Amino acid sequence: QVQLVESGGGLVQPGGSLRLSCAASGSIFRINTMAWYRQAPGKERELVASITNGGRTNYADSVKGRFTISRDNVGSTVDLQMNSLKLEDTGVYYCNLDYTGWFGDNLASWGQGTQVTVSS
């Protein structure tokens, strides 16, 4: 069983900053990719940013230059630093884990989601 614990959401004014954090634990042989997705009201869930085991990052065009994804040295925690927040960044942010289980199977797990609201 795998647990993803998210933290750091909240209410911020446009132009402000927030930092999200997600810690993974449980029956994991190897973490492959960790990512943040978001879902705005009435919209589909979309990828915000991802980071591979090797440190390669990928960002949605809408957040490039404003958001930074990073992992700790152990590799089991992923952070998302969000700067210059805009109204359209509002949504529920979900941590996603792509990992290899102890039987060599490729699996994925989702966090419970954390609300980010950008409002004046």
Image (cartoon, rainbow, N blue to C red):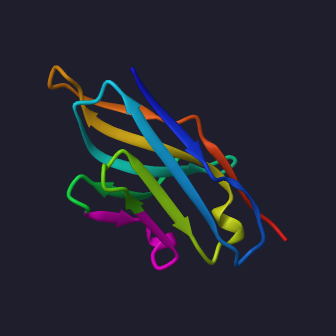
Magenta region includes residue 60: yes
Q: Nearer the viewer, residue 102 or 91?
A: 102
- On the picture, is 50 further left or further right than 41? left
Residue in the picture at 53% in, 38% down: 5
> What is the quadrant of residue 57 in the picture?
bottom left
Residue 39 appears at what percent x and percent y? 59, 48
Q: Residue furthest front?
A: 73
Q: Which residues are magenta?
A: 56-69
| Picture residue at 27% right of the left edge, 36% below the top | 99
Q: Residue shown at 42%/52% (left/top)? A: 78
Q: In the drawing, does residue 82 fall left or right of residue 65?
A: right
The mark total stands at: 0
Establish if 63 lies above or below 27. Answer: below
Please state, as top left, top right, bottom left or bottom right, where the N terminus lies in the image: top left
At which x and y percent is residue 47?
45, 54
On the question of residue 44 being in view, the answer is: no
Considering only vertical position in the picture, is 119 above or below 35? below
Q: Position of residue 12 (x, y in %)?
A: 76, 66
- Considering every residue shown, the one lying at the far right of the view is 120
| Residue 16 on image: x %, y % | 70, 74
Q: Is residue 68 above or below residue 77?
A: below
Q: Nearer the viewer, residue 24 or 105?
A: 24
Residue at horizontal 49 percent and vertical 46 percent from the top: 22
Magenta includes 67? yes
Left/right of residue 55 with respect to residue 95 in the rendered view: left
Hey, which quadrant is residue 109 in on the image? top left
